[in-house]
Image (cartoon, rainbow, N blue to C red):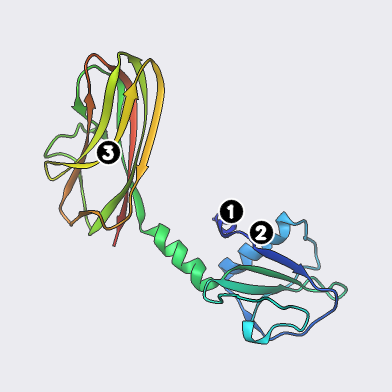
Amino acid sequence: MKKGFVVFGVLVVLFLATSVVAETMNVSGEIDLLVHDVLESKGLTGEGVGAVREVDFNNLPDNINIDNIDDTNLALYEVDMGPEEKPVYIVTASESKFKKVISKFSKKMFLSFGYSGGIIESTYLKSATGVLGDLDKGYVMMRKGSVSGISTNLEILGGEGVVEMIIYKNKEEVGFRNSFNIDGSGIYNDYDVMSEGILNFEPGDVISVYVNLEKDIKVNDVTTLLEVATD
């Protein structure tokens, strides 16, 4: 989890020329870990590193002048570097923004489909439990949500033409899919994403994936991930 915090990035690291006094606020353990990750990436480690405090944008230290700061998305954190060192100030994601991004990704989950071995004619893919899907067999949705992405990795043993990974919802084909133009043997990859709230589903809806092979194409070992976002 610690490495995940770095995804928010650090916009600025400010080293003050003189000591300052600023109005500060305590931070959560997650933000504390984020800031210490940043310090470590900059080589600023040691026994003297102390508390991390959030600085109030309305009471910035005299030595800092940051224009056009949106304090709903950004925050300034002060790090105590010890009694003999001047503090370090880091501008990064605010805690409210941090929690919003974490909440967004916590709604995502993946439905795993696949087929181990050779395929010489069109068929449904199997679920993660190894059950072969069909119009009535698939993953049953437990909450409202929408499909937001699909990715596929497969091997072509021979033939030419088009291979499609077609999503079915409640026995009906939907337009969102992976598509491959096959011109020779080898490993093929494809992924497609779409905005949430377009390809929607309801609790109880059944989702399955069908691999459609054109002409004499021979496929081996299919792995397909369906990304869904729940409300």
User: How far from the left and from the top, in percent, is residue 60?
Assistant: 69, 83
Above or below, 210 relative to 35:
above
Above or below, 151 relative to 70:
above
Residue picked out by circle 1: 3
The three-letter amino acid code for the residue at tag 3 is Arg
Residue picked out by circle 2: 37
Residue 56 in view here: no
Direction front: furthest residue: 68
- Nearer the observer: mark 3 or 1; the answer is 3
SS category of the residue bearing label 3: strand
SS category of the residue bearing label 1: helix
**What is the C-alpha distance between the residues marked 3 and 1?**
32 Å
Above or below, 90 relative to 184:
below
The three-letter amino acid code for the residue at tag 2 is Asp
Tags 2 and 3 in contact by the CB under 8 Å rule?
no
Judge the density around disc 3: few (<14), some (14-19), many (≥20) Cα neighbours within 10 Å: many
Judge the density around disc 2: few (<14), some (14-19), many (≥20) Cα neighbours within 10 Å: some
Q: Residue at x 42, y 57 (%)?
A: 105
Residue picked out by circle 3: 177
Give residue 112's quadrant in the image: top left
Nearer the N terminus, badge 2 or badge 1?
1
Q: Is residue 90 left or right of residue 207?
A: right
User: How far from the left and from the top, in percent, is residue 228?
Assistant: 31, 51
**What is the C-alpha distance between the residues marked 2 and 1?**
8 Å
Q: Is residue 99 left or right of residue 27?
A: left
- In the picture, the quarter occupied by the C terminus is bottom left
Tags 2 and 1 in contact by the CB under 8 Å rule?
yes
User: How far from the left and from the top, in percent, is residue 94?
Assistant: 56, 71
